[in-house]
Amino acid sequence: MGMELLAPAGSSAALRAAVQSGANAVYLGVNEFGARQSAENFSIDELGKWVDYCHLYGVDVHVTVNTLIKNSELNALTDCVKRLNSVHVDALIVQDIGVADIIKNTVPDMTLHASTQMTVTSLAGVKYLENMGFSRVVLARELSRNEIEYICRNTDTEIEVFVHGAICMCYSGQCLMSSILGGRSGNRGRCAQPCRLPYELLKDGEGIGKGYLLSPKDMSLVNELGALKKCGVRSLKIEGRLKRPEYVSAVVGVYRKYLDSGKSISPQDMRELTDAFSRSGFTDGYFKNRLGADMMSHTSGNSAENKFTPDAVSRTLENANIRKIPVTVTGTLKKDSPLAVTISDTDGNSACAIGTVNSETAVNRPLDEQRLREQLLKLGQTPFECTECDIYADGGITIPIKEVNEARRRAVQELIEKRCERRTGRVAEHTVLERCERENSDIILTAEVMTEEQLKAAVEGGIKRIYAPPEILKTLKTVPQGVELVTKVSDIFSKQDISTAAVLTASPAGIYHYDGKKLYGDFRLNVFNSNTAEHFSGLEGITLSPELNIGEIRDILKYTTAKTEIIGYGHLPLMIMRNCPIKAAGKCRSDGGSFTLRDRKNEEFPLVCSHGCRSVLLNSKPIFTADKISDLTKLKINSIRLIFTVENFPQCGKIISVYKRALNGEKVDMPAENTFTRGHLYRGVL
């Protein structure tokens, strides 16, 4: 089986272009629950005819249900899934793990693909999803060839990778920048792309570079198709549901050509890709593990000329009929019998049409084999192309030519219908979570720390549960009585040596790998609804998504007994990046100094280092909720986390003291105006 070429279809015109240009599959969104809400998308009512159109050409249809879903949307989501099942889509692409559970319970025959929004970067992550019933995983774009190959070699799950188009600076599914700065969540399909704006890089307050520092070039792996095949990749994905149909046509056409030929791309065809869309050229930096300035664009938008070849344009036209399906046509005409026309494809489908009148002895010109063949081969504007024609005709007989044409037409129509036929998958009544009564319990304070002095401040401040990286925990000589030390493993999974009994994991991969440990789930699990909370309820505790508001948190907790935590203080991580913007500027935080990014409003966003030489961009202002603690205690959550990143020892101690006093019922004042944020607790996201 060859590699699948998977094309974006943000509109009906783009879908047609993808099919006519040679895609094996398309992915698209409906008007709800897709991660490209600004695309034209499809209504489910109209989708059925486009699914038939794709299936006619042997093209699969994957539908994106790859956003985080609120409790208030779960009923609509369930109805949407049932309707998608009824129009015979081939797979659903999912981000929210609670949604995956709903799909498996509601339409159990539906194929599940794990979205790149799930941030799967490891074999452990694939294994977790495989055990859930996913048949395909779309890997994070940040993986190198060796990492992709290792995963492919050690799983039977289909692996899909992006090969062309825009890449985010942040790991997909982990970006909160658009959400926190503007209320438009990338996890909900509404990213405002603040990363494509200009920034200035500061070191110790002094400018050392400026420009589009968070805007990577587009990816192109057209010259790595052979390498991807050797890795064992099943599907090659082209990004671009927001792109115009001509772009889809051009890119799919070029990739189809070189998938089929196995050759290196010509300069002319590379120019076609560049002319279609580029940001100062292309990059293969992640795949080849060559990070740095070469991966970055000098512009935020399209630097291409938007020129498209006549061939690319022709495949976008409403009456485009370029892609042909090879068939065998057989005509049988015997004496005193009607004409029989059979048309068969290479997939095992066959259609037969019998004429309505018997043949007669020819008075003048008989209908010989040659003339009958010529008539049967007139497939014209049908999607079929005859590659073999067999004629069995007695001599000296004839039938009206309109009989030949009508039999051919009916055989064509029957074959079209057979190629579009799909069995409707089973539908079950999804079991809705029952409302539960949560116990009132004392809320505890927890602390997440990055440095030794922050750890010391948390211990001395009487914090009873402390999350810290393994290298920081090793600096603690003695563990105070009653303090639970939890190893915070890497946000992007990698195997680490753990010395504690408990682990805070940010990914399903960590849950799979550290099975047997006492596990806490971090906010990067994107727990956004009760079903997802219930999925992870076997963990010792889960941190709810910081994109939820108080009302949405209350709704979630009505239907789950999972122990829950929310973030009550801290500079929220907006991005986690493999390609460090500091290193791209020729600097390194390990050499000393503090680095920030300054935006056009003069807000400064700290940059800190994370495990694996990844860079984390923090919000310019910390979340502060101590003066609103009574609102939080009414939620019946179990703990409030204080995240310490850039704070020193005295600052940590002061913050801990303020929150402890607030929990004890003392009145605390809010900080000075414009020095803090409430996050999403009082606004939420679209």
Image (tube, rainbow, N blue to C red):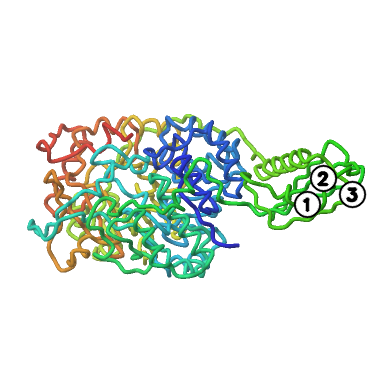
Horizontal placement of 561 versus 422: left or right?
Answer: left
> Is residue 561 something one can see in this rendering?
no
Q: CA distance from mark 2 to mark 1?
A: 8 Å
Q: Nearer the viewer, residue 343 or 185?
A: 343
Q: Which of label 3 and label 2 is nearer to you? A: 3
- The first of marks 3 and 2 along the sequence is 2
Which residue position holds label 3?
Answer: 396
Q: Amino acid at mark 2?
A: Ala
Q: Secondary structure at mark 2?
A: strand
Q: Amino acid at mark 1?
A: Thr
Contact flag, marks 1 and 3 (Cβ < 8 Å): no
Image quadrant holding the C terminus, namely top left
Query: x%, y% of residue 63?
Result: 50, 43
Contact flag, marks 2 and 1 (Cβ < 8 Å): yes
Give the number of the disc on residue 340: 2
> Is residue 459 something one can see in this rendering?
yes
Query: x%, y% of residue 288?
Result: 37, 69
Q: Name the image quarter holding residue 52.
A: top right
Which residue position holds label 1?
Answer: 330
Which residue occupies 59% across, 44% down?
110
Q: Secondary structure at mark 1?
A: strand
On screen, residue 603 above or below 629:
below
On screen, residue 80 above or below 269:
above
